[in-house]
Image (cartoon, grey):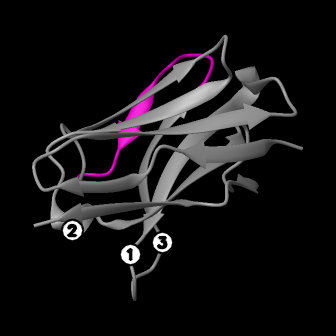
Amino acid sequence: QVQLVESGGGLVQAGGSLRVSCAASGRTLSMYVMGWFRQAPGKEREFVGAITWSTVKTSYADSVKARFTISRDNAENTVYLQMDSLKPEDTALYYCAARRIDRITYNYWGQGIQVTVSS
């Protein structure tokens, strides 16, 4: 089991920055991919980006590429989502998730944290 707890969300003006954290516990993450997803009101949950823990390789959705950065702190067992140049359309509930590197499905999810971008 992997437990995930997000923190750091909040309200920010358009053009501003915010960093969301995801603290993981329960398993060594060297065999895991950590993903970020978001869900806006009335919309389906969408993939934001991911990081492979062991290689630190990242991938991003086109909508956030060059604005968002995912990183991880091995000592703290924490994944970060740095969001810059935020837009009102980035407003959503943001979720951290984890899957084994040899699996497709994300099995473990955090509770979600609200990010609101005002225009």
The N terminus: image quadrant: top right
According to the image, label 3 marks what residue? 45
Residue 100 place in picture, x, y as percent? 74, 39
Locate residue 66: give its quadrant.
Answer: top left
Q: Residues within 10 Å of mark 1 (few under 14, many from 20)?
A: some
- The answer to whether residue 101 shows anywhere in this view is no
Q: Give me the disc on residue 31.
A: none
The C terminus: image quadrant: bottom left
Give the main secondary structure of the magenta stretch: loop
Relative vertical location of residue 42 with respect to residue 93 in this rendering, above or below: below
* Foreground of the two, 119 or 100: 119
Q: Residues within 10 Å of mark 2 (few under 14, many from 20)?
A: few
- Mark 1 in CB contact with mark 3 (< 8 angstroms): no
Q: Amino acid at mark 2?
A: Glu
According to the image, label 2 marks what residue? 89
- The answer to whether residue 119 shows anywhere in this view is yes
Q: Earlier in the sequence, mark 1 or mark 3?
A: 1
According to the image, label 1 marks what residue? 40
Q: Amino acid at mark 3?
A: Arg
Residue 58 place in picture, x, y as percent? 42, 30
Rendered residue at 50%/19% (across/down): 56
Q: Is residue 4 magenta?
A: no
Q: Which stretch appears magenta?
A: 53-62
* Foreground of the two, 30 or 87: 87
Q: Report the mark closest to the observer, 1 or 3.
A: 1
Q: Earlier in the sequence, mark 3 or mark 2?
A: 3
Q: Amino acid at mark 1?
A: Ala
Q: Earlier in the sequence, mark 1 or mark 2?
A: 1
111 vs 87, left or right, is right
